Amino acid sequence: MLITSEAWVERQLRMKKNIYMGGQLVGRDHPLIVPGRNVIAMTYDMAQDPKYKGICTTTSHLDGSEINRWCNLHMSVEDLLTKQKSTRCGIHNCGFCMQRCMGNDGLNTLSVISKELDEKYNTDYHKRFQEYLKYFQKNDITSALAQTDVKGDRLKRPAEQDDPDMYVHVVKKTKDGIVVRGAKCHITMGVYADEVIVLPTRVMREEEKDYAVAFAIPTDTDGLYFLNRASAPRERKHFKAPLAEYGSSDAVTIFDDVFVPWERVFMCGEYQEAGRMALLFANYHRHAYCGCKPGVTDVIMGFTELVAEYSGIERTQHVRHDLADLIAVAELIYAAGIASSVNAVKSSSGVMIPDPVYSNVGRRLAGENIYHEHNVLVAVAGGLPATLPFEDEFFNEKTAPFLKKYLARKKGVSAEDIHRCFRSIGDLSCSGFGSVWQIAGVHGGGSPIMETIAILANYNLKEKAEIAKYLAGIERTGPDKSEVFPGEKKNLETFKEHLRIYKK
Ligand SMILES: Cc1cc2nc3c(=O)[nH]c(=O)nc-3n(C[C@H](O)[C@H](O)[C@H](O)COP(=O)(O)OP(=O)(O)OC[C@H]3O[C@@H](n4cnc5c(N)ncnc54)[C@H](O)[C@@H]3O)c2cc1C
């Protein structure tokens, strides 16, 4: 089912208060929360817009009903490819992270792992998950995803921490459910999501089986608190602009002995699979980044091209080279996402798993380039995004004529458009809001070092050494073959079919 953004906001406003901000217990109508909520409302609006039919919407594999793309499981390569497109389009509309991918990545992870757990341990997690998915799709649910534990001393494992609550864990089991305690950090959109899906953050050992827990609960469940930090561009008084309507919220999320009924528990104690669940979520989320990050670069690139044009330097060679850098970053990351999608393998639950080497190299490239991209933008823009007078000075009758005269650039470009362009660049590269998204560009979805580890874990370097041995005339000891693609080998016909779907 598809609901309207208005119906979704109404549902949000009916939730119990459990958000702390600025020393106060606040409601979901707090003005600092609204810009972030607008991003999610936008995803509901896009699903209603005929222009995005089939991109922001799809058909449920459960009952054939029309659903939001973010309530979908990836049942095909086409689903993975369209997820990338949908994310990139979303970012073009709001200007930065459109946030909703995380809950969807969590759903796909739960589907795959719950099935594998049932196969291995004869549990009934997958049945529970299927019921949850029906509820999710029927009610057009938005979910946050809480994986990153607060973690305490980074060099100590969960069971070695002085305080056992540094990782979310089960403290009690009853016939009706479990009680969990701990805290997750940086949780985006928790304060404007219907639900939060909670997953383990790392590999667990037997003595850490209470930490091997996955579940989903409404965001106003008793004992759940969000200590929230909201960020958004400075409010525009006069020159309203779409970019300034959107924002985000990230929260330290406290689980203060939260009760979770069994029907919402999807892993409980199967420590052997906690690492696989954590890494699979990371893989889905890094695949999501391969659609998201090119969208962010499109925005940076767009402002770089625009400001160069307004300043009259758009044909200058160094500016063209800088723009070529941005194109290369955006499209290589997007291409990694395509490669990850077309090399996906089907899990036993039927859900497709993107190729982890390609999703991780794409995400790593994104993390390593984010500050370079902003460097390009500010190098081309000059210093004005940092020093632009406040909006009021453009409307004060004494100062407005000065600014109109002295901020003029290329002939034919209005003072208002110059002002709008520089103010937006300031929002992106020189504001609290912009800095949050630069740091998200490095760490969101896992810091580059995490991708490096994942790449090395999934890549067959020994096979490369066999190629070298052959070329050097050294006797080979490994298999007499080389992989064309790091992922599952597919025949050419399958590969062509995937390309055909993608080009559609
Ligand atoms: C804006 C934003 C939004 C986010 N949204 C979400 C969200 O919605 N849900 C979610 O679950 N997470 C979210 N994250 C969390 C993100 O995934 C983490 O920031 C990331 O995984 C890094 O974890 P950390 O911040 O705890 O840093 P740390 O883990 O403390 O890492 C900092 C540094 O310490 C190093 N380090 C850490 N542990 C070790 C070790 N054992 N040995 C050696 N070196 C180590 C790392 O390599 C890194 O260089 C978000 C992050 C940001 C910035």
Image (cartoon, helix red, strand yellow):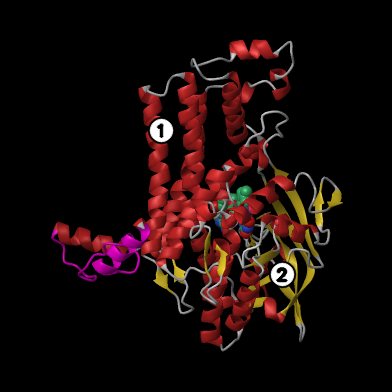
Residue type at the position of mark 1? Leu
In the picture, measured across the screen, residue 484 lies left or right of residue 179, that is left
Quarter assignment of residue 111: bottom right
Q: Which residues, given as a range, are shown in magenta?
A: 473-502
Residue type at the position of mark 2? Ile
User: From mark 2 to mark 1, how far is it between C-alphas?
Assistant: 44 Å
In percent of the image, x 45 and y 62: which residue is there? Answer: 80
Q: Residues within 10 Å of mark 2 (few under 14, many from 20)?
A: some
Residue 394 lies, with reference to residue 323, above or below; the image says above
Residue furthest toward the bottom?
A: 122
In the picture, measured across the screen, residue 383 lies left or right of residue 75, that is right
Q: Earlier in the sequence, mark 2 or mark 1?
A: 2
Q: Residues within 10 Å of mark 1 (few under 14, many from 20)?
A: many
Mark 1 — residue?
Answer: 323
Is there a contact, CB below 8 Å, between mark 2 and mark 1? no
In percent of the image, x 65 and y 34: which residue is there? Answer: 431
Quarter assignment of residue 438: top right
Is any part of residue 292 visible from this angle? no
What label sits on residue 217 in the rendered view?
Answer: 2
| Residue 136 vs residue 269, the one in the foreground | 136
Q: Position of residue 452 (x, y in %)?
A: 45, 55
Q: Which quadrant does the N terminus fall into?
A: bottom right
